[in-house]
Image (cartoon, coloured by chain):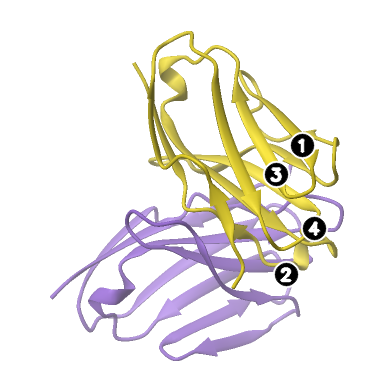
């Protein structure tokens, strides 16, 4: 069945360093969504990408959707302690529920 | 403001007990989901429902059942709780339109089975 792999599982950075998490699907996706879960909280929607090669930015966060629509990445520039949490990607195909990756947990030390 | 409400935030139950986890959404969403979240395993789909009285098995339905008698309410039932069901359970909902809709999550229910 469809799988969504996300790497790395954990990442620790110093405040001010950049961070990237990658998401790969075994099949072509119709869309990909990204969620952030703060420690002790629940996942909250960040963004959705639907077009091949799409790039979207939210302040220091840059999201990309691959040309083949099978991979995506989230890049955070100059991390801050408020970026701490687990970032999930979720891939969608028509007629199926979104498939979540296992998440990348980011820790930031100041 | 959209809202998915899970009735219990923290529960401790004994092995063999029947456990009900209730979830209510106020967005008139057709689709509702139950996930469990465990360290290193991410979010795993237990069951989902796309309409009243309709249900579909997710990736890990064993040991669970669900009930959707009303559109706004989706219940997760553990018929006989076991220690390996100790976990954080997340309810979620989304509207129609396929996988392009945002998923809204509840705050989670932490279940400990002793």
Q: Nearer the viewer, residue B8 or A4?
A: B8
Residues marked 4 and 2 touching at CB (< 8 Å) = no
How far apart in space, not on screen, are marks 2 and 1 (Cα)?
Answer: 34 Å
Q: Secondary structure at mark 4?
A: loop
Give the percent coordinates (x, y) of residue B66: 70, 29
Q: Quadrant of residue A21?
A: bottom left
Residues marked 3 and 1 touching at CB (< 8 Å) = yes
Would you say A68 lies left or right of A88 here?
right
- Residue A93, which numbered label? 4
- Residue B73, which numbered label? 3
Q: Residue at x 68, y 55 (%)?
A: B93
From the image, state the color of chain A.
purple
How far apart in space, not on screen, are marks 3 and 1 (Cα)?
Answer: 6 Å
Tell me the residue that label 2 is attached to.
A69
How far apart in space, not on screen, are marks 4 and 3 (Cα)?
Answer: 26 Å
Q: Quadrant of the C terminus of chain B?
A: top left
Q: Residue at x 85, y 36 (%)?
A: B54
| Chain in yellow on the image | B
Residues marked 4 and 3 touching at CB (< 8 Å) = no
How far apart in space, not on screen, are marks 4 and 2 (Cα)?
Answer: 11 Å
Q: Residue at x 64, y 20 (%)?
A: B62
Residue A55, compared with residue B7, is above or below; it is below
Task: Output the chain of dot 1.
Answer: B
Tell me the residue that label 1 is attached to.
B68
Q: Of the two numbered discs 3 and 1 on the same chain, state the one appearing first in sequence.
A: 1
The reply to the same-chain question for discs 4 and 3 is no
Would you say A28 lies left or right of A71 here?
right
Q: Quadrant of the N terminus of chain B?
A: bottom right
How far apart in space, not on screen, are marks 1 and 4 (Cα)?
Answer: 24 Å
């Amino acid at each position: 069945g469809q799988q969504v792999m996300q790497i790395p599982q954990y990442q620790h950075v110093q405040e001010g360093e950049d961070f990237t998490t990658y998401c790969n699907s075994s099949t072509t996706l119709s869309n990909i969504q990204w969620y952030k879960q703060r420690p002790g909280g629940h996942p909250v929607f960040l963004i959705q990408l639907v077009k091949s090669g799409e790039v979207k930015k939210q302040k220091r966060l840059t999201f990309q959707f691959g040309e083949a629509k099978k991979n995506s990445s989230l890049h955070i520039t100059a991390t801050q302690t408020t970026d701490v949490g687990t970032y999930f990607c979720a891939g969608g195909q028509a007629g199926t529920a979104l498939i979540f990756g296992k998440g990348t947990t980011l820790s930031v030390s100041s | 403001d959209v809202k998915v409400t899970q009735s219990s935030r923290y529960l401790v139950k004994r092995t063999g007990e029947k456990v009900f986890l209730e979830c209510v959404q106020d967005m008139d969403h057709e689709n509702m989901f139950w996930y469990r979240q465990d360290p290193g395993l991410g979010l795993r789909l237990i069951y989902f429902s796309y309409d009243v009285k309709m249900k579909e098995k997710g990736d890990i339905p064993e040991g669970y059942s669900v009930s959707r008698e009303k559109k706004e309410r989706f219940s997760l039932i553990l018929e006989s709780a076991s220690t390996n069901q100790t976990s954080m359970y997340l309810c979620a909902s989304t509207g129609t339109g396929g996988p392009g809709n945002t998923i809204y999550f509840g705050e989670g229910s932490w279940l400990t089975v002793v």
